[in-house]
Image (cartoon, rainbow, N blue to C red):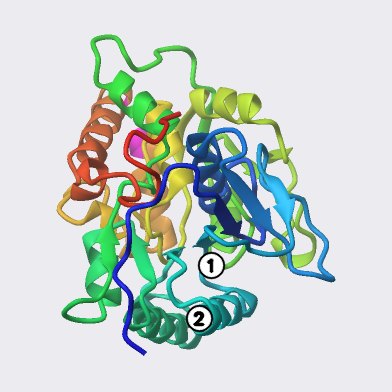
Amino acid sequence: MAAPSPAEPASGARLVLAYRPSGFPELGGLHRLGCEIVQRAGPDGSATLIARGQSGAPLPGSRPTHRLRQGDRLVVIGCNVAWAYRLVLSQRLRHPRRPVAWLPSFHDPATVRHSRRARLAQLALKVLQRLGVTVHVQTPHEQQLLQAGRGAHCRLSSHGLPADVRRGLEQCLQPAGTASGERSIDLLFVGRPTLQKGWGRFIALAQRSRLRCGAILPSRPVGPLAPPAGMAVLLAPERSRISQELGRSRLVLIPSDYESFGIAQLEAIAAGCVVPILGHWPLWEGFEALQWQQLDDAALLAACERLAADEPRRRALALAQARHVLDQPSARAPWLPGLLPAGGGAP
């Protein structure tokens, strides 16, 4: 079957989003992305696909649907659910001219614990490009890993940088743009308390540290991953409270092994925090400062303590990080090219 070329969307074409929520909706990159697509698509411009027999709520502002209708464009968000692969394959076989866009949160197999699953996702996304699926990636590194070859549809896009976060980063670079209020939290963890995100390492560091530590989590972990006594923990707070806590924090420490773009880290930088690079995060290639991946726990704690105590240097690094993000090819690329009609709304 010859792969159809991606067509420009017709005005009024409905976007049907295939997305199964997980993680931390208030800060999760995939959830944020889905909400921004819904917002840009406008009233009645989108729907959330819910498989028959499955429960789940649609993305805010989007209506639920159990099937695709003629003229719909399918948008798959994430790449870790087998249901999505089955859905797309069936659509290519039954409706080969239906436009399909895939927005993966892809992890480099060479740098993560779940390397086997990552390699399977890599292979599947390459095959799907040959079948006419357009894969939108967040960094040139991802594009290099997922490009299926000549004629494949693998596009660099700025969708990993939400519009409100971009505005926050730009504001940081304005005169007096960085908040100068009291920052009473030295080290803050934000995100899911999983091994992949480095939660286990963070609590080990917090137990040894003299710094004031806190965490923003979707739920309270138990057992070996329970937060240490005395740590300030916010559970599933609203977005306004998350922004408030980021504005009170000096360093945001998320020791994850890989980040494709890292919305939580970008939100922290937009709030004036410094985010040390603690894993393989392609967004930060070429940024010489804060490359602390090789530090052991003792050296990492010492580096955090020095930076937390040196406010002028900390603020200078926060500005440098904001500038670096906005200078990246990903930030300058179009937002999901071809997904919305020309003149599609911006949030």
Image coordinates of residue 74 in percent, x first then y, are 52, 62
Give the amino acid type for the residue marked by disc 2 in the picture.
Answer: His
As displayed, is residue 235 above or below residue 88?
above
Reply yes or no: does residue 309 show up in magenta.
yes
Q: Which residues are magenta?
A: 306-310
What percent of the width, then of the height, locates residue 278?
37, 57
Which residue is denoted by mark 2 in the rendering? 114
The picture quadrant where one finds residue 173 is top left
Q: Is residue 208 above or below residue 129?
A: above
> Residue 123's x, y, as percent?
39, 86
**Viewer-proximal residue among 182 and 50:** 50
Q: Which mark is residue 196?
A: 1
Q: Nearer the viewer, mark 1 or mark 2?
A: 2
Asked if residue 308 shows in the view, the reply is: no
Report the residue at 32% width, 86% height from top: 2
Q: Residue at x 65, y 26 (%)?
A: 241
Looking at the image, which is closer to me, 264 or 20? 20
Query: Secondary structure under badge 2?
Result: loop
Q: Are dots 1 and 2 in contact, CB under 8 Å? A: yes
The disc at residue 297 is none
Q: Residue at x 41, y 30 (%)?
A: 346
